[in-house]
Image (tube, rainbow, N blue to C red):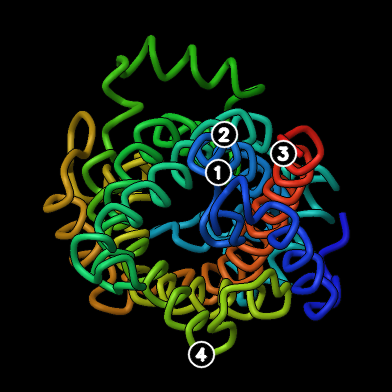
Amino acid sequence: MELSADPVVATLEMSEIKSKDTESSEGDGDYESLPPHVSITTHMTAGAVAGILEHTVMYPVDSVKTRMQSLQPDPKAQYSSVYEALRRIVRTEGLLRPFRGLNITMMGAGPAHALYFACYERVKRKLSDVIQNGGNSHIANGLAGSVATVLHDAIMNPAEVVKQRMQMYNSPYRGFLDCVRTVRQTEGLAAFYRSYTTQLTMNIPFQAVHFMTYELMQERLNPHRQYHPGSHIISGAAAGAVSAAVTNPLDVCKTLLNTQENVVLNSMHISGHLTGMANAFRTVYRLGGMSAFFKGVQARVIYQMPSTAIAWSVYEFFKYFLTKQQLEHEAGTGPA
């Protein structure tokens, strides 16, 4: 897939398509304004591909982030940097160890991101019509991102629980099916949503900042909203870095709720399972003070910058490509 296309060529191509379809679509052929009858399918297809690639390309760094957020890690799993962690994991645990849990992540990422982007685009358009008379509204972008997050996390939260348990050092599970069965039998189905409210507490501000930053960067770098790979990559990377750094304390709490670190719970004399955002916040603070909330922040930013750059560039490419194909089809089959 070629994401480095010349923006000038892309702009000319879209202009040609628009001119061919002017009579039948009455100006609805803009890249940003998809024809209404294909928009949902286009957004869902583009979003699913973008989500899968986002989570797979940088997955080893995500594995490192999970381990570095451990509040009381095993002495053999204490790392000074992302590179040192990856090198040691591969050397001592095998080449494929950083990819443990990738399969369940891919299974959740496709449908989660399909709904995520489709919901975002639809809600953003509706709110922008109300708030800004169809123009770009940062409030609409933030609210749309928040609404989309509720649907996304409802699908991804169980996958996150399984993924993070398999990423931990000395994880006892043979595979994701073994992990699912064991967690269900020992902790019940509720375990897969134990961190859901925390996930939403983290991801709603994360996605609000993420989408607002992306749209703001697009206003500066790509004001005409043409297909421009460079601007999508830069805007996506900036959005990922800012939102990741701001919400890292909440991510540490989410990781604790997902993994239920036995050493941590025993040291705090907690029987059963840790639940709730408030309890997780207190536990993190009592064990490590304020600095504990920023454990793994370097790995998280390193993971999110390329991940969101990949997600947005792939999403915008497929949105452009699928729209172009649809408009060419309509131009060729419509009335003369």
N-terminal of the two: label 1 or label 3?
1
- Residue that badge 3 annotates: 330
- Residue that badge 4 annotates: 220
Residue 41's mark?
2
Name the residue at the front extreme. Answer: 336
**Residue at image location 76% in from the left, 43% down from the top:** 331
Amino acid, disc 1:
His
Crowdedness near tag 4: few (<14), some (14–19) or many (≥20) residues, C-alpha within 10 Å:
few
Mark 4 vs 2: CB contact within 8 A = no
Circle 3 or circle 2, nearest the eye: 3
Amino acid, disc 4:
Arg
Q: Quadrant of residue 170?
A: top right
Foreground of the two, 152 or 229? 229
Circle 4 or circle 3, nearest the eye: 3
Amino acid, disc 3:
Glu
Foreground of the two, 327 or 236? 327
N-terminal of the two: label 4 or label 2?
2
- Residue that badge 1 annotates: 43
Mark 1 vs 3: CB contact within 8 A = no
